[in-house]
Each structure stands twice: as C-alpha cells, then as structure tokens.
C-alpha cells in the first residue's frame, strides 16, 4: 500500500507528531496544495499537518473531494462537516451553550464572562474571552469574524476549565487509543495572543507543559463514545478523531470540539499509540 501524509508548505517534511507513524507505514509527506502531486498514485492519503487550510476552507474541501472518499482519510464528507463548528448544533450531545451570530447579527449585551470564536478556525485564532466591561472588545472581535464572512460563536466562559482543563479522548480506527489533559488555553481576558509564525496558532499551544497523558471519568468516556458513534453512523468509522471536553455549568462534561482533520495526537506521551495509529492506517 502506497501512503501519503498530507501536510502544508510550512512543514513540508511533516511535524514531529507524525514522523514515527510515517516510518512504520512507509508514508511520504506531500503538501496538500502542491499541484504537481499525483494523488491518484496513492492508495491512502492521510490528512495530517494541513494547518493552513482554515485560511482557504473552500479550496481545501474541494481538494479533499478531488482526492476522493475511497482514498482520503478522514473522508471528504467528514472533513466538510468538521471544518465548520456549527456542527455543535447538529450533534446530539451536551455542548457548551452556544449562540451562533451570522454576519449581520450583532452581539447582545452580556452580564457574565463569555468566549467568542469563529466557526472556521484552528489553534484558537481569532478567539478570546471577555468580561462584561470589555463588551466593546468582544463586539470588535465579532466584527472581525463577520468581515471575513464567518459566523461568530458566543459561549459562556465555563470556569471549571481553569481547574480541570480540557479532557481529550482519542480514537484510532474506531477504538479508543488514549486520553490527554490540556491546560486552559484562554488563561486571561482578551484575545488569545498568537505565536509569531505563519498561520500561527495561539502562542500557548507551544507551551512544553500544555498537554499531558491522563485518564477520563466514566462520564467523559460516555460522552466521547456518543460523539464518536454519531460521526461513525453518519460518515463511517473515522481513521482518527479527538473528542475535546470541558466541565459544563454543573460540572458535567460537555463537548468543546470534535477534531477530525488535523489534530495534534501527542503520541509521544503515550506508549503504543504510534503503533495503534499505524495499524489503523494499514487497515483503513
């Protein structure tokens, strides 16, 4: 089986998270928007470090469709679903309470801390948390998001994340692989500062201690299983999926995001996870 790992021009040789898996399956790193690449020459094309896609979503989704459902993992249909965070309104699972502000709709007054983020983004770009006295700043971020043609998501800031962080359950080939714990990303009020690189994520994403191997509670596993089952019923078994959760208003887990396009998998933290992903790729 000839396998390509789709990456981007920023990381033409892939990112460290993928190197060991690529060696096991014999994958070649190829830049997703390189028009010289003959994708039909590969039996499987695995989306990995395509971190610039959110700036050209339509082009990226069209590329996915051109590679095709039989070849691309995850499939173009799942990618098209997952690029737009409005999937939170589609999945039948508890999520952080969310208001979707389409372009032309203004931010309403609020009396408690909120989070504003775009429906299409990665790495906490154009994302911030705002107290009521910073309503003008929050409205300005909404305006920036709308000016780009995107929808703004407005959610209450759920303070349980300050203590417990995010829990991520990862699935490879339909099976749970490992659990991660991420420290809070929005650690102070205001827009999340970005790293000083092209198409940069939030600077905090590069903290060495941001993520650690962890365990999940029965309730967290149950929520992750529900989300994974729903996308499997809709799109078939994903090659990989990361289900991110935070404590909800009453402490119960709620879905923060589904990551099925280019998630960091942090396999260096969990022995055996590299081999599990390699096995899933070869069986896909």
Image (spheres, rainbow, N blue to C red):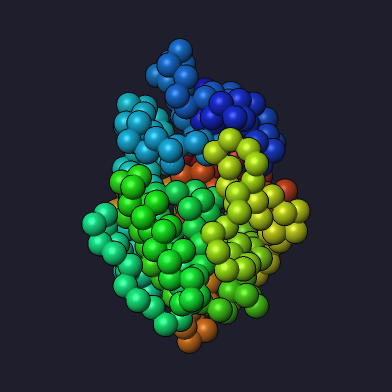
Residue 171 coordinates in the image, percent (x, y) = 52, 55
Residue at position x 32%, y 31% in the image: 62
Image-based side of 30 in relation to 13, left or right: left
> To which quarter of the image does residue 107 belong?
bottom left
Task: Decide if residue 4 is on the left or right side of residue 151.
Answer: right
146 versus 93 height, above or below: above
- Decide if residue 173 is on the left or right side of residue 184: left
Most distant residue in the bottom direction: 250
Question: Percent position (x, y) of residue 85?
Answer: 37, 56
Establish if 216 lies above or below 63: below
Q: Could you tell me if residue 273 is visible in this image?
A: no
* Farthest-out residue, right: 208
Q: What is the count of numbered marks?
A: 0
Q: Quadrant of residue 216?
A: bottom right
Most extreme residue toward the top is 36
Work out whether residue 19 or residue 284 is closer to the camera in this orientation and state it. Answer: 19
Of residue 11 and residue 143, the one placed in the foreground of this image is: 143
| Relative vertical location of residue 116 with respect to residue 25 in this rendering, above or below | below
Above or below: residue 13 compared with residue 182: above
Q: Quadrant of residue 231?
A: bottom left
Classify residue 224 as left or right of residue 206. left
Whether residue 182 can be seen here:
yes
- Image location of residue 66, percent across then percent down: 32, 26
Percent position (x, y) of residue 264?
Answer: 59, 48
């Amino acid at each position: 089986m000839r396998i390509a790992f789709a990456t981007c021009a920023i990381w033409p040789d892939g990112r460290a998270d993928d190197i060991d898996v690529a060696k096991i399956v014999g994958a070649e790193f190829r830049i997703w928007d390189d028009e010289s690449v003959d994708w039909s020459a590969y039996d499987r094309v695995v989306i990995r470090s395509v971190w610039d896609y959110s700036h050209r979503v339509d082009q990226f989704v069209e590329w996915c469709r051109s590679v095709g459902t039989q070849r691309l993992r995850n499939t173009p249909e799942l990618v098209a679903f997952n690029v737009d965070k409005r999937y939170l309104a589609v999945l039948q699972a508890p999520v952080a309470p969310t208001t979707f502000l389409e372009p032309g709709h203004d931010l309403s007054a609020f009396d408690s801390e909120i989070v504003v983020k775009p429906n299409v983004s990665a790495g906490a770009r154009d994302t911030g948390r705002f107290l009521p006295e910073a309503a003008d700043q929050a409205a300005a971020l909404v305006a920036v998001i709308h000016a780009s043609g995107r929808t703004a998501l407005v959610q209450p800031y759920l303070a349980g994340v300050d203590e417990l962080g995010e829990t991520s359950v990862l699935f490879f080939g339909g099976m749970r692989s490992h659990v991660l714990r991420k420290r809070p990303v929005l650690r102070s009020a205001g827009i999340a500062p970005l790293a000083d690189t092209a198409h940069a994520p939030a600077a905090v994403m590069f903290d060495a201690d941001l993520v650690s191997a962890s365990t999940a509670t029965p309730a967290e596993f149950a929520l992750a299983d529900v989300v994974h089952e729903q996308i499997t019923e809709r799109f078939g078994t994903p090659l990989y999926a990361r289900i991110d959760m935070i404590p909800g208003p009453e402490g119960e887990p709620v879905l923060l995001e589904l990551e099925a396009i280019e998630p960091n998998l942090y396999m260096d933290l969990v022995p055996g996870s590299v081999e599990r992903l390699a096995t899933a790729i070869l069986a896909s």
